[in-house]
Amino acid sequence: MPVTPGVCLIQTATELLQEVVGYPIHIKEAIKIKFFQTHSPENLLNFDLSWFKERELRGRISIFQGKKSIAKIDAYFEPS
């Protein structure tokens, strides 16, 4: 049974946030990254994005498969 690597979930979340903010970004500092369950690439995911700008862009991303929480990412981002 195939499993989606965590780094792929983080990259996808970063690319989605990048589309929303409108400019290329990458993770500057990961505050917290938690994986709760494995994910099969055959199943669809939902991403809940929130972000705000303090001195830096901070993003909070929750990843769900249906109602199950797969992962949460809290990080500072900077322009690429």
Image (cartoon, rainbow, N blue to C red):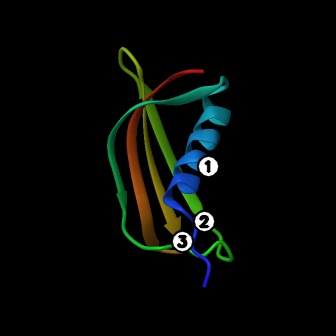
- Between 53 and 80, which is closer to the camera in this rendering? 80
78 over 59 or under it: above or below: above
Q: Is residue 2 left or right of residue 51?
A: right
Q: Position of residue 46 (x, y in %)?
A: 58, 61
The kind of secondary structure element at disc 2 is loop
Q: Going from the N terminus, do you reach mark 2 or mark 3 first?
A: 2
**Tags 2 and 1 touching, CB below 8 Å:** yes
> Which residue is denoted by mark 2 in the rendering?
45
Q: Please state, as top left, top right, bottom left or bottom right, where the C terminus lies in the image.
A: top right
| Mark 2: few/some/many CA within 10 Å (<14, 14-19, 20+) | some
What is the CA distance from the residue labelled 2 to the residue labelled 3?
A: 5 Å
Q: Going from the N terminus, do you reach mark 3 or mark 1 first?
A: 1
**Tags 2 and 3 touching, CB below 8 Å:** yes
Residue in the image at 54% along x and 71% along y: 65
Question: Which amino acid, by three-letter code, is at mark 2?
Answer: Leu
Q: Going from the N terminus, do you reach mark 2 or mark 1 first?
A: 1
Name which quarter of the figure residue 66 lies in: bottom right
34 over 44 or under it: above or below: above
Residue in the image at 60% along x and 85% along y: 1
Question: Which amino acid, by three-letter code, is at mark 3?
Answer: Gln
Q: Position of residue 29 (x, y in %)?
A: 37, 31
The kind of secondary structure element at disc 1 is helix
| Mark 3: few/some/many CA within 10 Å (<14, 14-19, 20+) | some
Name which quarter of the figure residue 24 lies in: top right
> Which residue is denoted by mark 1 in the rendering?
12
> Which residue is denoted by mark 3 in the rendering?
65
2 over 32 or under it: above or below: below
- Between 41 and 53, which is closer to the camera in this rendering? 41
The kind of secondary structure element at disc 3 is strand
